[in-house]
Amino acid sequence: MKRLVVLGAGTAGTMVANTLRARLPDGEWAVTAVDRDDLHRYQPGYLFLPFGTYQPRQVTRSRRRYLRRGVELVLGEVAAISPDAKRVELTDGRRLAYDVLVLATGTSPRPDQTPGMEGPLWRHAIHDFYSYEGALALAEALPSWPGGRLVVHVTDVPIKCPVAPLEFAFLADSWLRREGRRGAVDITFVTPLSGAFTRPTASQVLGSMLDDRKIAVESDFMVERVDDEAKTLVSYDGREVPFDLLVTVPLNMGADVIGAAGLGDELGYARVDRHTLQSVVHPDVFAIGDAADVPTSKAGSVAHFEVDVLVQNVLAAIGGQPLTARFDGHANCFVESGDGRALLLDFDYDAEPTTGRYPFPRWGPLPLLGESRRNHWAKLGFRWLYWNVLLPGRPLPLPARPVPLDHALTP
């Protein structure tokens, strides 16, 4: 019996395990997914927890429930990966041999990497929403916060879901206006980027939206430390941004075991060919989703678009064939802009976000790079698709990309 082991049973790991289980012969291959617990979190929902749009029960379910029959779920912490021995070791001493290993270990916020961030103000005047616990703590803190200087801050890139900090700033502006408190709050968006977003076209649109909402932008800000006593962000070039409430996105890093195994870069992301998703170090190792160092967004949509490529290439590698399936960096995401509206971005390694409509150019119904209520409701409705279509490995009922106009007009 040959063994395929998937480290991580989150979004990417669940989709990969389910899809490969359906494609590999039961009698020849065992498929195992490994994760630390049986709690599958819908991470896009973390953004909505602080504002009461979602409740905790709506973002948490069982991992086992969404794994296809025939996929074994092993609960435990990974202690080490031994690529030469083709073995994964757990902290309780168990060892899992593999013939093919898929890294789907994601990325995690690391406030400990920035001096002063995880100090006495952590989860008091300094909050994050990139973790379940952080989002709940912020949900408890926001209603009683008296106002002042709200700073929404990104430590460094890459980060999981790069539009989420912007979404938080937009939603905070909207929520404060509904509460009648916006006049008592100054909002500043602090970013290491030169603009609001990584892609110039989208950055211009999103930057204008920040201006319209009177949200100040402090760009090219590389934070050196957080001064707890002065309640100030301090950059390496000496700039300071004071805050009364800091909502930060800490440095995001991959799993420590990836770097320790010699499979990763300096941030712990697996080094892979950006098109085939195969490790550049060990050919029997692949990586997907946030765990991979591919130069595109770390977002759930990317993992979804990567699955078919990875599955085809794993099957080719098993069969001794060339890896011909290629991932093009495709990503799309809804951007909540407040007041029940959102934008939709679609891009890849080479293509910039553009205007138009999705999925069909003339009748849409969803506008690209433009605000609409339909985009907002589509984002909220995506949670149902996530649990019922994406995780089980069922095909989406819509095309992944906007349909070109000439195709849309073909009978």
Image (cartoon, rainbow, N blue to C red):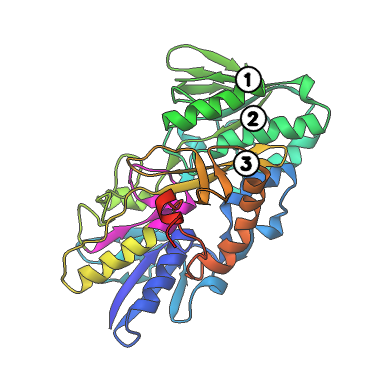
For the N terminus, give its image quadrant.
bottom left
Please say if the residues under marks 2 and 3 sit with CB atoms less than 8 Å apart. no
* Residue type pointed to by label 3: Ala
Of residues 230 and 352, the one nearer the viewer is: 352
Magenta segment? 284-305
Q: In this rendering, is residue 158 above or below 224?
A: below
Q: In this rendering, is residue 78 above or below 20?
A: above
Q: Residue at x 41, y 38 (%)?
A: 158
Mark 1 residue crowding within 10 angstroms, few (<14) / some (14–19) / many (20+): some
Q: Secondary structure at mark 3?
A: strand
* Residue type pointed to by label 1: Lys
State which mark lies toward you, 2 or 3. Answer: 3
Q: Which residue is mark 1?
A: 231
* Residue type pointed to by label 2: Leu
The label number, if any, that marks residue 342 in the structure image: 3
Q: Which residue is mark 2?
A: 121
Of residues 51 and 36, the one nearer the viewer is: 51
Confirm whether the magenta stretch covers residue 295.
yes
Please say if the residues under marks 1 and 3 sit with CB atoms less than 8 Å apart. no
Confirm whether the magenta stretch covers residue 321.
no
Q: In this rendering, is residue 322 above or below 107?
A: below
From mark 2 to mark 3, how far is it between C-alphas?
Answer: 32 Å
Which one is earlier in the sequence, the residue at label 1 or at label 3?
A: 1
The label number, if any, that marks residue 120 in the structure image: none
